[in-house]
Amino acid sequence: MKSPVRVTITGAAGHIGYALAFRVASGEMFGPDQPVILRLLEIPQALSSLNGVGMELEDCALPLLHDIVLTDDPAIGFREADYAILIGAKPRAKGMERSDLITENAKIFAAQGRAINDHASPDVRVLVVGNPANTNALIAAANAPDLDKRQFTAMTRLDHNRALGQLANKTNRLVADITRMTIWGNHSMTQYPDLGNCLVEGVPALELVTRDWAIDHFIPRIQRRGAEIIEARGLSSAASAADAVVDHVRDWALGTPEGDWVSMSVISDGSYGVAEGIVFSFPVTCAGGEYRIVQGLELDALSHSRLKKSEQELLGERAVVEDLLGR
Ligand code: NDP
């Protein structure tokens, strides 16, 4: 029997956390032979609800779930974590500017970065979901000076999966027939879902759909999909966000399929001319628990301008939190 993997989930009593915890505990993230220990972290006001989540997890009698820790103390929540999934964040309140939201959440993610630095496994891998996810990941990484910034990522996998779904519908193929989809940039309206390198059953996607459809329908639909779900459901996406967390961490841990890649927001190393040091979504391959940004893709002028727009937005977000980027 393998020794258990410790997975910390923050905001675990929230909508996404509730949809996620059971899937991690049932083996969907790390496979059917990998036991897990769940360390679920919440704010004090949500502890009662978190206890309910703990009871339901117990009641599932999941053979892979070796222990559950429920806490509001980050020192306990992040203790020896192999994976930390940071979902808990303040939602945007009425009348709040985006910069206010960034500043409010920045404090949370600075504190969590410090706690991860001090209590998690030195090899911890971190996925930030709470918005603004890319900048929150940057702040957490900056506040964890003993860790490599490559250990911190943010989630653009839901955008990636949404793009697969829309293209599969349009081309009347299965999502499994599609490879090399890419989301570039920030997890925001400036993200750039790019069909330029995408293949459908090995055929370039742009030979199967028109450029006009890609620009006028596909890109804005992916950018606005979150709002579309809120309008339909009256609540933001939760199950699909949890599903994307499972995909992101599973691929990072266990590897991406040969010949394909996934989209992950990672610390920029300057690839494709993107400013170094911001957390930006790139196409990546994963193997042996490490990711590598796919190199050498051709980008046309339109793509370059879209990447620049998202880069500029992230540089602007970084400027808002400048004073929290050090311990
Ligand atoms: P959700 O579980 O629905 O969402 C949590 C975060 O994920 C939000 O920031 C949300 O952003 C973000 N998110 C990122 N991608 C997506 C996506 N594709 N779809 C939907 N959300 C996305 O929020 P809840 O309010 O239900 O739960 C949050 C929990 O976090 C609560 O239980 C609360 O107690 C806890 N919390 C913990 C904190 C801490 O640990 N210090 C601080 C604050 C809250 P967006 O708002 O843009 O939808």
Image: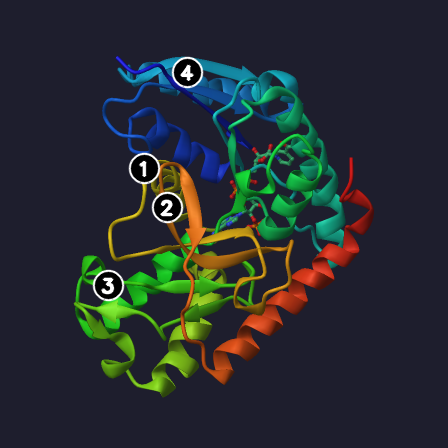
Q: Which residue is mark 3?
A: 178
Image point 42% across, 81% down: which residue? 215
> SS at mark 3?
strand
> Nearest the camera: 210 or 90?
210
Whole-angstrom CA distance, mark 1 to mark 2, is: 8 Å
Whole-angstrom CA distance, mark 1 to mark 3, is: 20 Å
Earlier residue among tags 2 and 3: 3
The answer to whether mark 4 is within 8 Å of ligand 1 is no
Q: Nearer the viewer, mark 4 or mark 3?
A: 3
Q: Which residue is mark 2?
A: 286
Amino acid of disc 4 = Met
Whole-angstrom CA distance, mark 2 to mark 4, is: 35 Å
The residue carrying pointer 4 sits among few (fewer than 14), some (14 to 19) or many (20 or more) residues within 10 Å by Cα, namely few
Residue 260, above or below 27:
below
Q: Nearer the viewer, mark 1 or mark 3?
A: 1
Whole-angstrom CA distance, mark 1 to mark 4, is: 30 Å
Q: Nearer the viewer, mark 2 or mark 3?
A: 2
> SS at mark 1?
helix
Residue 312, above or below 57:
below
Earlier residue among tags 1 and 4: 4
Amino acid of disc 3 = Ile
Single out the residue that lies furthest toward the right: 323
